[in-house]
Amino acid sequence: MRVLGIDPGLTRCGVGIVEGTVGRPPTLVAVGVVRSDPALDVARRLAEIAVGLEEWFDTYSPEAVAIERVFAQHNLGSVIDTAQASGVAALIGARRGLPVTFHTPSEVKAAVTGSGNADKAQVGAMVARILKLSAPPKPADAADALALAICHAWRGGHTNRYAAAAAEARSRR
């Protein structure tokens, strides 16, 4: 299964693609970030994120999308920006008929490091180790996106029953 992990953000949206299934080590396909210009208004920035994400979908043809679930933060503006970028990513995946699953940060940390309380450095180090990379991907948004993709691949996409049912229906066509 080819999974596109997305760590949503309005300035930097981490993207990472792995191939893998339950019980097998995942392999890195691609990693990076999609950026938007902070000088633009929010609508134009979201449009830039959408264009960048569309290029990743077109280039790498993922079979599933894993997005970090937005959680409450102290900075309300940051939560809103992240939620808007998350919605853009989910919409692109849904329009392409792909299963889109949201994973909480603690769920991803636990899957990758064994601890739901791991810090960013631990997540990056484990992503590098799992994917046999010489160093954690930079910036941290890119490593987080890979962690999302790994988490989803290892769980077989079954954390979201709707997404699993949709994938099953597509495979029967």
Image: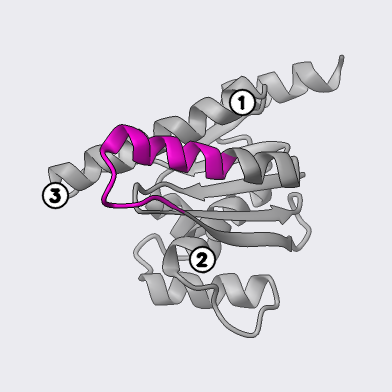
Q: Could you tell me the amino acid type at mark 3?
A: Asn
Q: Residue at label 1?
A: 163
Instruction: Using residue 159 as the reference point, say whether residue 71 is left or right of it.
Output: left
User: Element under label 3?
Assistant: loop
Above or below, 76 relative to 166: below
Q: How many numbered dots are placed on residues in this image?
A: 3
* Rendering quarter of residue 106: bottom left
Q: Nearer the viewer, residue 97 or 125?
A: 97
Q: Give residue 75's mark.
A: 3
- Magenta: main secondary structure: helix
Q: CA distance from mark 1 to mark 2?
A: 24 Å
**Which residue corresponds to the image point at 57% horizontal and 49% vertical from the top-left?**
5
Q: Could you tell me the amino acid type at mark 2?
A: Ala
Quarter containing the C terminus: top right
Q: Give residue 143's mark.
A: 2
Does residue 137 appear in the picture of this structure?
A: yes
Instruction: Using residue 46 as the reference point, say whether residue 72 is left or right of it.
Output: left
